[in-house]
Every structure is written in C-alpha cells, then in structure tokens.
Amino acid sequence: MKVLLTGGAGFIGSCMLWRLNAAGIKDIIVVDHLGESSKWKNLVGKHFEDYFEKDKFLDYLETGKLDRKIDTVIHFGACTSTTEQNATYMMENNYVYSRRLAEWALKNRKRFLYASSGATYGDGEMGYSDRDDMTPKLKPLNIYGYSKHLFDLWAIKNNLQKEFVGFKFFNVFGPNENHKGDMRSMVNKGYQQIKATGKMRLFKSHKPEYKDGGQKRDFVYVKDAIELVYHFLEHPEKRGIFNIGTGEAKTWNDLANALFLALGMKPRIEYFDMPEILRGKYQYFTQAELEKLRQTGCNHKFFSLNDAIKDYVSFLEKDTYL
C-alpha cells in the first residue's frame, strides 16, 4: 500500500501513521503544517518516505510534479479548533482544500478516506445517526463543524459517499495531542491540572436537566479510533460516511473519576461557570450511533473509559508518544 497521509504529524494522523507502520506499511508521504508547534515530535521514530508542507503540496500534486506512486489518500489534515472565528480561513483550509484533494483522487482513481467530525451534529436535536438522508438536516454550532459538514454534503450531493470513506470522529483523546494547546482533550488538561493543583476543573451545567459535570460525551480512545479506520483500509469494498465513537456516552464526572483512579488519588473536582461565548454552542450530549458501522462487519471491542484513561496516563507519566 502506497499512502498519502495529510495531517500526518497531527494527533489522530500521527497515531494513524504509527498504526500503518505497525502493519508494515512505510511507503507513506506525510503532509502537514509544522510551523512553530511541537507536533514534529509526533513524527520521531516513525517511518515514511517523504514530507511536504500543506500550503504548497496541492499545487505540486495537481501539476503532476509528484513522482511517487500513491494508491490511497488518508486525508486527516484540518484546522480542528472549535473556537476559531476566522470563517474564511476555516472554509479554505477544511472545505476547499479537502474538495481539491478529493477531486484529484477521483480523477486519478485513488482511494479516498477522510476525517469528518461529530461536531457536524450540532446540539444533537436531530440525533446522531450517520445515515445519508439525515446529514442534510444537521445544523452545526460552530464554523469548524460547518466546514466539515459542508464537505459531507458535497460528497453526498455528488453520490461520492459510494466512492469515499468518511469518519465522523467524536471526542477522541490519547497520546500525541500535546501540541493542540486549548484543543487538547480534558483527559490531557485534567492530568496537568491534577499534577499542578491536586484537583480538576469542569464546567458547571447551565441546563437544569444536567448536573454539574453531568454533561455527556462519547469519549473514544485514539487507539480505538485508528483501529476503526484500519478496518476500512482492510476492506476497500466498504464505503460511506461513518460515526467513530464508542456508542456509549459518559459524563465529564465519569472521565474525571477515571483520571483520579488512574493516578491513585481521591477525586477533587471544582466546577466553574462556562464562558458566555460557549453557552450557545455547547453540546450537552453526544453519542454515536454505530449500527451503520457494525453493518460493515466491524466488531471492534472498545477500551472501557477507565482502561483507556489508565493506558493514556502511562504515556503522560513518561512524557512519551505513540
């Protein structure tokens, strides 16, 4: 397999690179934007043939200057900030770039797998079904979710969900996310908080039906997420847009308690008011529907939340990467 992996130095992308290497796949071109971040560390020790910066890569690819063979495109490169306010940048980076790469893959008859997001579901009023007939009804809450949603819509409008594989990643956490700053998972942030103060901070609830820390998310360990992606690499006949989650929502309190347990400490949780800017865009409940995924023959057994966090903490304690 000869792979083009965008976002290959990022969180999920670098873990995917690790999984490909574990399968003996090293003929990989990595595309990303390193800038001044520390995500270059995610590439250390991994095997790939070449690296390109994303800004110049598409022109290089589209003009036929790339002399390496490619048969599979895994497009995980994107701006994943849910608080990004520059809509023009987000649309160019996440929608236009994705469409150009997808059109190149179609023209050259390459397999195309790409990252969508659970953020496309908005506040969940339409549920969390990944059926194609439900997708046009979704209303994302932020420009990140909308940029991902727009590409899903483009694919479905052109009947390309029968050619591509899309992954609606829910709340992924795990090794290799240190460079993400404020967009790191709460497992990562909470670990740092506990180490520094002995306690973990969570948002108060601003809806009476949810207790403080009782808001729910479908937390999925990155090792599980990449196994689901790899399932589709092994089964090229399976195509469509699929949820990537556990199918079982857990509360933020569950996550915090699992983190304290992994550290061998008694839970100390402090609740604080959610910033006003987030209150109208905050998801109080997410839970991936997995029926469509299971119909592909994927019977993956997920880490429990406790076991996933225990495994992740082993990386955090040693400051190591996957």
Image (tube, rainbow, N blue to C red):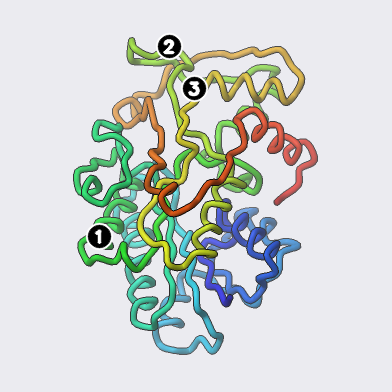
Q: Are marks 1 and 2 in contact (CB under 8 Å)?
A: no
Question: Label 2 is placed on what type of residue?
Answer: Lys
Q: Which residue is mark 1?
A: 156
Task: Compare marks 2 and 3 and give the one earlier in the sequence.
Answer: 2
Task: Compare marks 3 and 1 and give the one earlier in the sequence.
Answer: 1
Q: Classify mark 3: helix, strand or loop.
A: strand
Q: CA distance from mark 2 to mark 3?
A: 10 Å
Q: Where is 268 relative to 138, above or below?
A: above
Give the quarter of the image for residue 24: bottom right
Q: Which residue is mark 2?
A: 211
Using the image, tell me which numbered label, if any, was put on residue 198: none
The N terminus lies in quadrant: bottom right
Question: Could you tell me which residue is drawn at 49 percent across and 64 percent down?
Answer: 235
Q: Classify mark 1: helix, strand or loop.
A: helix
Question: Label 3 is placed on what type of residue?
Answer: Thr
| In the displayed structure image, the side of residue 15 where residue 203 appears, left or right | left
Give the quarter of the image for residue 154: bottom left
Residue 115: x %, y % from top left: 43, 56
Q: CA distance from mark 3 to mark 1?
A: 33 Å
Q: Which residue is mark 3?
A: 251
Task: Compare marks 1 and 2 and give the one earlier in the sequence.
Answer: 1
Between 168 and 92, the one nearer to me in the picture? 168
